[in-house]
Amino acid sequence: MEVLITHYKRCEVLSIIGRVDSNTAPQLQEETAKLTNDGKYKIVFDLGKVEFLSSAGLRILIVTQKECKRYNRGEVLLANVPPKIYSSLDLAGFTALFKIHTSVVDAVAAF
Protein backbone atom coordinates (compact mmCIF):
# COMPACT_ATOMS: atom_id res chain seq x y z
CA MET A 1 0.00 0.00 0.00
CA GLU A 2 1.11 3.52 -0.76
CA VAL A 3 -0.31 6.73 0.72
CA LEU A 4 0.17 10.03 -1.07
CA ILE A 5 -0.79 13.22 0.77
CA THR A 6 -1.65 16.36 -1.16
CA HIS A 7 -2.07 19.59 0.77
CA TYR A 8 -4.68 22.05 -0.44
CA LYS A 9 -5.72 25.37 1.01
CA ARG A 10 -9.03 23.96 2.28
CA CYS A 11 -8.13 20.36 3.11
CA GLU A 12 -5.74 17.43 2.86
CA VAL A 13 -6.19 14.61 0.32
CA LEU A 14 -4.96 11.11 1.13
CA SER A 15 -4.67 9.07 -2.06
CA ILE A 16 -4.44 5.41 -1.17
CA ILE A 17 -3.00 2.93 -3.66
CA GLY A 18 -3.22 -0.84 -3.15
CA ARG A 19 -4.70 -2.97 -0.40
CA VAL A 20 -5.71 -1.77 3.06
CA ASP A 21 -5.59 -4.82 5.31
CA SER A 22 -4.30 -5.75 8.76
CA ASN A 23 -0.70 -5.56 7.52
CA THR A 24 -0.95 -2.12 5.91
CA ALA A 25 -3.55 -0.48 8.17
CA PRO A 26 -0.98 0.68 10.78
CA GLN A 27 0.81 2.71 8.08
CA LEU A 28 -2.47 4.40 7.12
CA GLN A 29 -3.30 5.01 10.79
CA GLU A 30 0.10 6.64 11.25
CA GLU A 31 -0.48 8.98 8.29
CA THR A 32 -3.94 10.04 9.48
CA ALA A 33 -2.67 10.54 13.04
CA LYS A 34 0.09 12.85 11.74
CA LEU A 35 -2.53 14.99 10.00
CA THR A 36 -4.87 15.25 12.96
CA ASN A 37 -1.99 15.89 15.37
CA ASP A 38 -0.93 18.77 13.11
CA GLY A 39 -4.43 20.27 13.37
CA LYS A 40 -5.61 19.12 9.92
CA TYR A 41 -9.22 18.06 10.38
CA LYS A 42 -10.62 18.39 6.86
CA ILE A 43 -9.53 15.22 5.09
CA VAL A 44 -10.50 13.61 1.79
CA PHE A 45 -9.75 9.91 1.30
CA ASP A 46 -9.26 9.22 -2.42
CA LEU A 47 -10.14 5.54 -2.70
CA GLY A 48 -9.98 5.33 -6.51
CA LYS A 49 -6.96 3.00 -6.54
CA VAL A 50 -7.85 0.89 -3.49
CA GLU A 51 -8.04 -2.79 -4.43
CA PHE A 52 -9.24 -4.10 -1.05
CA LEU A 53 -10.46 -2.51 2.18
CA SER A 54 -10.58 -4.78 5.24
CA SER A 55 -12.28 -4.20 8.56
CA ALA A 56 -8.99 -2.69 9.78
CA GLY A 57 -9.29 -0.08 7.04
CA LEU A 58 -12.91 0.58 7.92
CA ARG A 59 -11.87 1.11 11.54
CA ILE A 60 -9.33 3.75 10.48
CA LEU A 61 -12.02 5.59 8.52
CA ILE A 62 -14.29 5.68 11.59
CA VAL A 63 -11.54 6.65 14.04
CA THR A 64 -10.38 9.46 11.75
CA GLN A 65 -13.96 10.66 11.22
CA LYS A 66 -14.59 10.77 14.99
CA GLU A 67 -11.35 12.68 15.59
CA CYS A 68 -12.10 15.20 12.83
CA LYS A 69 -15.72 15.78 13.86
CA ARG A 70 -14.87 16.26 17.54
CA TYR A 71 -15.73 19.83 18.57
CA ASN A 72 -16.98 20.50 15.01
CA ARG A 73 -13.43 20.92 13.74
CA GLY A 74 -13.80 19.14 10.41
CA GLU A 75 -14.87 16.02 8.59
CA VAL A 76 -13.70 13.08 6.49
CA LEU A 77 -15.04 12.84 2.93
CA LEU A 78 -14.62 9.88 0.59
CA ALA A 79 -13.93 10.28 -3.14
CA ASN A 80 -13.62 7.97 -6.18
CA VAL A 81 -15.04 4.98 -4.30
CA PRO A 82 -14.90 1.85 -6.53
CA PRO A 83 -18.13 -0.20 -6.74
CA LYS A 84 -16.80 -3.18 -4.74
CA ILE A 85 -15.47 -0.88 -1.97
CA TYR A 86 -18.79 1.00 -1.97
CA SER A 87 -20.69 -2.26 -1.51
CA SER A 88 -18.46 -3.09 1.50
CA LEU A 89 -19.10 0.35 2.97
CA ASP A 90 -22.82 -0.04 2.37
CA LEU A 91 -22.91 -3.50 3.92
CA ALA A 92 -21.15 -2.18 7.04
CA GLY A 93 -23.56 0.77 7.23
CA PHE A 94 -20.84 3.33 6.57
CA THR A 95 -22.54 5.06 3.64
CA ALA A 96 -24.74 6.91 6.14
CA LEU A 97 -21.68 8.07 8.12
CA PHE A 98 -19.61 9.54 5.28
CA LYS A 99 -20.27 11.98 2.47
CA ILE A 100 -19.20 10.23 -0.72
CA HIS A 101 -18.17 12.21 -3.81
CA THR A 102 -17.57 11.01 -7.35
CA SER A 103 -14.27 12.90 -7.71
CA VAL A 104 -11.57 14.49 -5.58
CA VAL A 105 -12.40 17.88 -7.12
CA ASP A 106 -16.00 17.61 -5.90
CA ALA A 107 -14.87 16.53 -2.44
CA VAL A 108 -12.33 19.36 -2.09
CA ALA A 109 -14.95 21.86 -3.30
CA ALA A 110 -17.34 20.59 -0.60
CA PHE A 111 -15.06 22.15 2.01
Image: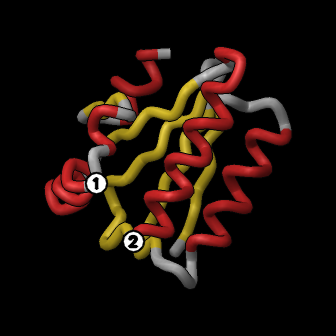
**Residue 106, located in which quarter of the rendered image?**
top left
Q: Position of residue 77 (x, y in %)?
A: 44, 33
- Residues at marks 1 and 2, CA–CA distance in whole angstroms: 11 Å
Seen in the picture, residue 7 relative to 87 is either above or below; the reply is: above
What's the residue at 47%, 77% (across, down)?
21
Q: Could you tell me which secondary element the residue under label 2 belongs to? A: loop
Which quadrant of the view contains residue 38? Answer: top right
Rendering coords of residue 87 (x, y %): 17, 55
| Residue 50 left/right relative to 3 | left
Q: What colouring does the structure picture have?
A: secondary structure
> Among all residues in the image, which is located at the extreme right?
38
> What crowding class fits label 1: few (fewer than 14 Cα within 10 Å), some (14-19), or many (20 or more)?
few
Tell me which numbered mark, 1 or 2, is placed earlier along the sequence: 2
How many marks on residues?
2
- Kindly identify the residue that appears in the image at 31 percent across and 71 percent down: 51
Q: Nearer the viewer, mark 1 or mark 2?
A: 1
Mark 1, residue position = 92
**Between 69 and 81, which is closer to the camera in this rendering?**
69
Residue in front for this viewpoint, 5 or 64: 64
Disc number placed over residue 54 in the picture, else none: 2
Dot 2, how many residues are within 10 Å of its Cα: few (below 14), some (14-19), or many (20+)? Answer: some
- Regarding mark 1 in the picture, which secondary structure is present there? loop
Direction from residue 49 to residue 111 in the image, left or right: right
Q: Amino acid at mark 1?
A: Ala
Residue 5: mark in rendering:
none
Q: Is residue 82 visible?
A: no
Residue 2 can be seen in this image? yes
Q: Residue at x 74, y 43 (%)?
A: 35
Q: In the shown orientation, is residue 97 left or right of residue 7?
A: left
- Single out the residue that lies furthest toward the bottom: 23
Q: Where in the figure is residue 96, as x and y percent of width and height?
A: 29, 33
Whole-percent x, y for residue 67 in the image: 67, 36
